[in-house]
Amino acid sequence: MRKWILPITIVCIISGLLLSLQFKAQASLSPNPIGERNEALVSLINNLEQEIDQYQENLNNLRAELDKIENSTVSGQAEIEALQQEIQKARLQAGLLPLKGRGIKVVLDDNQAGLKAAPNDDPNRYIIHYENILNIITELKLGRTEAISINGQRLVTPSEIRCVGNVILVNTTRLAPPFEITAIGNPDILEEVLLYGEYDLLKSSGFPVSYTKHYSDNPVEIPAYSGTYQFKFTKINE
Amino acid sequence: MNKKNWQIPITIVLVFLGVLLSAQFQTQARVLSDLSMQKTEDLIAMVRNLSDKRMQLERELRETQTKLRDLRNSTSDEQNIKNNLLAELNRLKLINGAVEVKGPGLRITFYDNSPILYVDIVSMINELWAAGAEAIAVNNVRINVHSSFFYTETENDMFITLNHQPLSYPITITAIGDPNTLEKGLTLPGGIIDNLALFGAFPILERKEEIIVPAVETPPVFIEAEIAKKP
């Protein structure tokens, strides 16, 4: 009779401890008493993102249509044809056309395994931060990249890479790990600039990072920029 | 018989423990980048940025629709077509930095005693774009998506390079945009100015009514990339 009392007591103590731990973690998931307000903000963000997706799709369609009309009207008129060619070249430079070519793909992910092995450590040491991405982009540019995208977001001149809290944003669009950086350029040169910088640091700190080189038989593709360009304060200096 | 009796509870404990531990790990892993885990003020900042973006998209959608309508209505009028194409080309020139531009903005100056690295210049430019900058130059060289920053060493000196050319001090970053918004973007608590101060770098910020940003020196060339036609 008595024999099972001791084990059951131990069982209850341990499960009690674990349960309380779990609840604590759960409680910290909804971080503050104004959790409800956060709920509202999160759903607002989700709605805005959906609307933005819709707008961007519409804008892309309109831009494609514009492209078609501008390239098809009155051929045979030399002046207009020259203009059309110049516009196409300018669109290429502006990141408004999807591109493909030789290049490199770099994948960065959070170090989940490292965090599991050291659950009491600061979790911030095990996630990819926007600085890591910014540094790799900066290094890739040294290898003469012709176009870069991160998780499908084309980088253009005013593109920013930043974080709000622990969320990484590029072109104001929320990105989630794993982060896939795609660049068009000479794959061997890009490999070289990649291997002696931030990528190497991440790798030696245990982050699951990898890259693949892509040659003409297996080119990378980079989408067009789907955002806007804004000039509210800028005037041409004449 | 008695020996077997305690095996069942222990098994249950261990199974339970396993389940709880894995749940615990999952919670940990998911917590950090989950939207609901962010601070209220961060969420508010995101809402604000997204609303701005939606507004800009709305405006550009309207403009593009008008452009399309004008083009469709003018298919027979060559002068009209030419005007529309010219207007489009001018806008693209503005986007590509192919023309010199001016506007209000912010000037940031690092004097030669500033202990800064090339990554600090990259961060500064990144923050300026995030704060809504419309055109940026460093030491009067226009920045675009292809601009590259690094460093070079001589016997007793180190230089930050822009497009492989050493930058001489004072290093001046000029950005066109709303001067107040640009300045706020840099000086918010824990922002880049605070960070630089930790390393003993104190750039001078000046709001300007007019800043002139030159055109890009060499337009980008595309050797590897070709236009990917949509299927």
Image (cartoon, coloured by chain):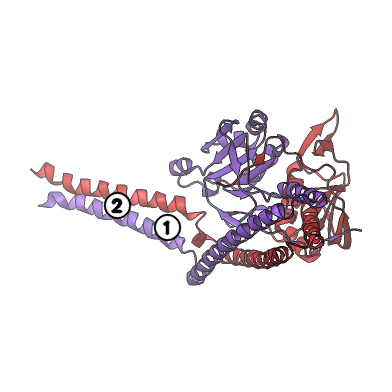
Chain colours: A purple, B red
**Separation of residues labelled 1 and 2 (CA atoms):** 17 Å
The image shows residue A210, relative to residue B90, as above or below, that is above
Q: Residue at x 87, y 48 (%)?
A: B140
Chain for numbered disc 2: A
Q: Quadrant of residue B115?
A: top right
Q: x%, y% of residue B153?
A: 81, 31
Q: Quadrant of residue B132?
A: bottom right
Q: x%, y% of residue B17?
A: 30, 49
Position of A166 with respect to B57 (left or right) is: left
* Residue B213 or residue B30, whichever sits in front: B213
For residue A16, the mark is none
The residue carrying pointer 1 sits among few (fewer than 14), some (14 to 19) or many (20 or more) residues within 10 Å by Cα, namely some
Q: Quadrant of residue A233?
A: bottom right
For residue A14, the mark is 2
Residue A157 at least partly seen: yes
Task: Name which residue type carries label 1.
Answer: Ala
Position of B222 with respect to A151 (left or right) is: right
* Residue A95 or residue A13, whichever sits in front: A95
Position of B27 with respect to B119 (left or right) is: left
Quadrant where the C terminus of chain A sits is bottom right
> Which secondary structure lies at badge 1?
helix
**Residue at the outermost right position:** A238
Chain for numbered disc 1: A
Task: Name which residue type carries label 2.
Answer: Ile
Residue A172 at least partly seen: no
- State yes or no: discs 1 and 2 in contact (Cβ < 8 Å): no
Q: x%, y% of residue A136?
A: 65, 40
Q: Are marks 1 and 2 on the same chain?
A: yes
Q: Residue at x 27, y 50 (%)?
A: B16
Give the mark nearer the N terminus: 1 vs 2: 2
Q: x%, y% of residue A53?
A: 56, 60
For residue A25, the mark is 1
